[in-house]
Amino acid sequence: MLKSKTAINGIRPILIVMILVLFISCHRKSASDHFSIEGKVTNGAGRKIILSEMGINDVIPLDSVNTDPEGKFSLSCEMKEPGFYLLTFSNVKIILVPQAGEKMLLQADLSRPSRTYEVSGSEDTRLLRKFLVESAVNMTRIDSVKEVLLQHEDHEDFYVVSMQADSAFQKISHDQTRLEKQFIDAHPHSLASLIVLSYSLGGGPVLDEEEYFGYYKKLDSTLTKTYPSNKHVLYHHRRVEEMKDRNEAMKGMGKSRKK
């Protein structure tokens, strides 16, 4: 009996160690498979905040919470893979590009324009936010030119004004194109570059598929290495392959016409 009791006492410390290791490993896994965001929304007490995942063709609501009397809130989300998420409150829509384990901090003010917010704790989200703020400036420039056109719609000088407007639109488009190319060149391994690549000033993407196909291929090459099984990257890869097939078909038609 003494021997049996001693053996049991010897097993207990081992069991305790095993349980502790299991607990720690589960805790680590839980932390690494989630991202969280805490924030304070000035002038936003009691506001409903919705967290959604941006799919390929849809937006899926995941969770929601109301800010407290001070405008503070906290959300945590399990993630199977890096992707795009949308934080919505009032007229504000914020795109998040988190990595697993990241803890983001948000500050926003509902009395200010929708994109005057700050996010820290996620580098890709910070980079995308900076791009969107700069792009919003170009959108404002476009709206200003359109307003001038409307004001001169029935005036005798409309032709002259429209020519000046065309020149202004071209300048804005050139500036936006340069902004997007610089972003992708600087951050080819960032998922945020996929958002930048598809960004539009009102029509189609600023970086047209035919004229800037090299940038589509560039992101396909870099992102498939960094995120080989990511659904957004795989979708982009399929698009690039379809573009290649169309280009090859067009080349084939051109050669047959020459013959």
Image (cartoon, grey):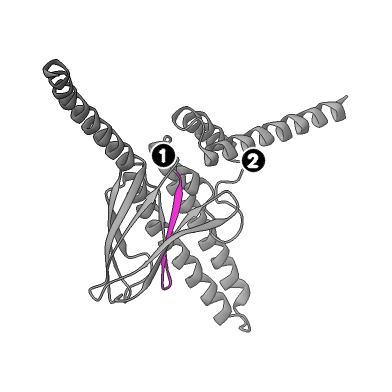
Cα separation between marks 1 and 2: 22 Å
Q: Which residue appears farthest toward the top when viewing the image?
A: 3
The one nearer the camera, 244 or 74, is 74
Disc 2 on helix, strand or loop? loop
- Residue located at (68% from left, 35% from top): 242
Residue 28 in percent (x, y) is at 28, 37
The amino acid type found where label 1 is placed reads Ser
Residue 67 in percent (x, y) is at 31, 70
Disc 1 on helix, strand or loop? loop
Q: Which marked residue is nearer to the observer: mark 1 or mark 2? A: 1
Q: Quadrant of residue 12?
A: top left
Say which residue label 2 marks. Answer: 210
The answer to whether residue 5 is left or right of residue 183 is: left
Q: Are marks 1 and 2 in contact (CB under 8 Å)?
A: no
Kindly identify which numbered label has been placed on residue 190: 1
The amino acid type found where label 2 is placed reads Glu
Tell me: residue 142, above or below residue 2.
below
The one nearer the camera, 10 or 88, is 10
Q: Quadrant of residue 255?
A: top right
Looking at marks 1 and 2 on the same chain, the residue that comes earlier in the sequence is marked by 1
- Residue located at (54% from left, 40% from top): 231
The one nearer the camera, 51 or 234, is 51
Decide: few, some or many residues near mark 1? Use Cα within 10 Å; few <14, some 14-19, many ≥20: many
- Residue located at (51% from left, 46% from top): 197
Which quadrant of the rendered structure holds the C terminus?
top right
Decide: few, some or many residues near mark 2? Use Cα within 10 Å; few <14, some 14-19, many ≥20: few
The one nearer the camera, 253 or 216, is 216
The magenta stretch spans which residues? 83-92
Which quadrant of the rendered structure holds the N terminus?
top left
